[in-house]
Image (cartoon, grey):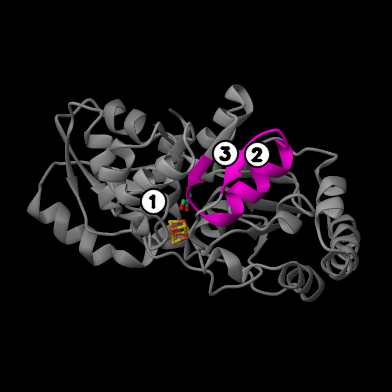
């Protein structure tokens, strides 16, 4: 999603004055710290609007953030997202200082699998390449062949030119890709705690309550949900769809802040907002970003023995 220069003005107009009064000094302080420390803030689409529209220099889905991270000039990079995203930035910028506003911001998918699990799967399926979702630790990436994101998963799987792949750790993403390709996919049983809660019944109810609503679902949702949505795609695919098609009424089956951020840019579209919060993404606040920059705290590092093979898996994906 492009940074929209007037979005912050719109946010100020939309927010209750007491909320804006709390955010404004933090936003100004972070702008000054960024200048002083030659720092940039990368923000995932699930960050709250005051972060997304207020202090981010780059916003987007996991794939976009990984691509941009590869060519950053800044001395300090603050990752407003979750820990695996900060590790990816560090792997692609080994000489830069990468800060996380809160080191506890994890991900249920990343914590669903260990490197030992991957090695056991490889032993059980000799010769089958391992395609690993970026929502994993650097240690898991290090024992994988190639990474993927929700934006390129099918292309990555098909690029390998093999009849069968192991696709880890998101069972639903794997099954959703399996519906679209002839490559046989062996999945793991990890789930996103946010997206696994959506059900086909939710969509049926939405369609009944809001006739004509366009339903977009993230591919981390169960396949039964994706099957009855109008379109499934990464957070960037959803944002681009709204920008291109300008639906009269839309629902984004994903994390709550996503709709808030996109809605601010498209005041003529009616956003229906049943959403699920990601508690990990919500650990990141303006205060935490400011403190990370002020106190130079929560640096993210990756053991060099892990970094070399993990970087190879990410770079293989980015080269596609
Ligand atoms: P995207 O790659 O679509 O931004 O998704 C990342 C994520 O964590 C979704 O839950
Ligand atoms: Fe992980 Fe799900 Fe949160 Fe994305 S929304 S960071 S996949 S727990």
- Residue ID for mark 2: 71
Q: Earlier in the sequence, mark 2 or mark 3?
A: 3
The residue at the point 11 percent across, 55 percent down is 123
Placement of the C terminus among the 4 image quadrants: top left
**Image spot of residue 206 (x, y percent):** 43, 45
- Mark 1 and mark 3: span between their CA atoms? 21 Å
State the extent of the magenta-drawn residues as a range. Answer: 251-272
Q: Residues within 10 Å of mark 2 (few under 14, many from 20)?
A: few
- Residue ID for mark 1: 309
Q: Nearer the viewer, residue 177 or 126?
A: 177
Asked whether the residues under the numbered discs 1 and 3 touch, taking CB atoms below 8 Å apart as contact, a structural biologist would say no
Q: Residues within 10 Å of mark 1 (few under 14, many from 20)?
A: many
The residue at the point 70 percent across, 75 percent down is 297
**Image spot of residue 21 (x, y percent):** 89, 68
Taking the image in four quarters, ligand 2 sits in the one at: bottom left
SS type, badge 3: helix
The residue at the point 84 percent across, 39 percent down is 5
Please indicate, yes or no, whether residue 77 appears anywhere in the rendered image. yes
- Indicate yes or no whether the magenta region holds residue 259: yes
Q: Earlier in the sequence, mark 2 or mark 1?
A: 2
Residue 313 appears left or right of 190 = right
Q: Residues within 10 Å of mark 3 (few under 14, many from 20)?
A: some
- Residue ID for mark 3: 64
SS type, badge 2: loop
Q: Earlier in the sequence, mark 1 or mark 3?
A: 3
């Amino acid at each position: 999603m492009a940074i929209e220069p007037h979005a912050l003005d719109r946010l100020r107009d939309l927010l209750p004055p007491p909320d804006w009064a709390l955010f404004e000094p933090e936003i100004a302080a972070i702008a000054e710290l960024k200048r002083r420390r030659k720092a940039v803030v990368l923000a995932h689409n699930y960050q709250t609007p005051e972060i997304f529209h207020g202090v981010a220099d780059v916003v987007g889905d996991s794939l976009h953030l990984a691509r941009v991270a590869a060519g950053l000039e800044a001395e300090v990079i603050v990752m407003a997202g979750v820990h695996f995203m900060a590790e990816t930035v560090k792997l692609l910028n080994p000489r830069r200082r990468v800060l996380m506003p809160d080191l506890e911001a994890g991900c249920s998918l990343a914590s669903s699998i260990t490197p030992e699990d991957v090695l056991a799967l490889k032993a059980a399926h000799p010769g089958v390449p391992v395609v690993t979702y970026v929502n994993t630790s650097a240690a898991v990436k290090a024992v994988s062949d190639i990474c993927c994101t929700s934006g390129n998963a099918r292309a990555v799987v098909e690029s390998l030119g093999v009849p069968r792949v192991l696709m880890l750790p998101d069972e639903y993403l794997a099954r959703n890709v399996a519906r679209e390709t002839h490559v046989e996919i062996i999945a793991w049983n990890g789930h996103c705690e946010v997206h696994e809660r959506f059900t086909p019944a939710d969509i049926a109810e939405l369609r009944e309550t809001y006739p004509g609503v366009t339903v977009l679902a993230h591919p981390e949702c169960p396949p039964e949900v994706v099957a009855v949505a109008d379109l499934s795609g990464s957070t960037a695919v959803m944002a681009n769809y709204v920008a291109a098609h300008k639906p009269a009424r839309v629902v984004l089956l994903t994390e709550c802040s996503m709709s808030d951020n996109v809605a601010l840019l498209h005041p003529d579209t009616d956003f229906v907002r049943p959403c699920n919060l990601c508690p990990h993404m919500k650990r990141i606040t303006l205060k935490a970003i400011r403190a990370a920059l002020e106190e130079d705290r929560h640096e993210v590092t990756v053991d060099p023995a892990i970094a070399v093979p993990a970087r190879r898996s990410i770079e293989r994906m980015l080269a596609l």
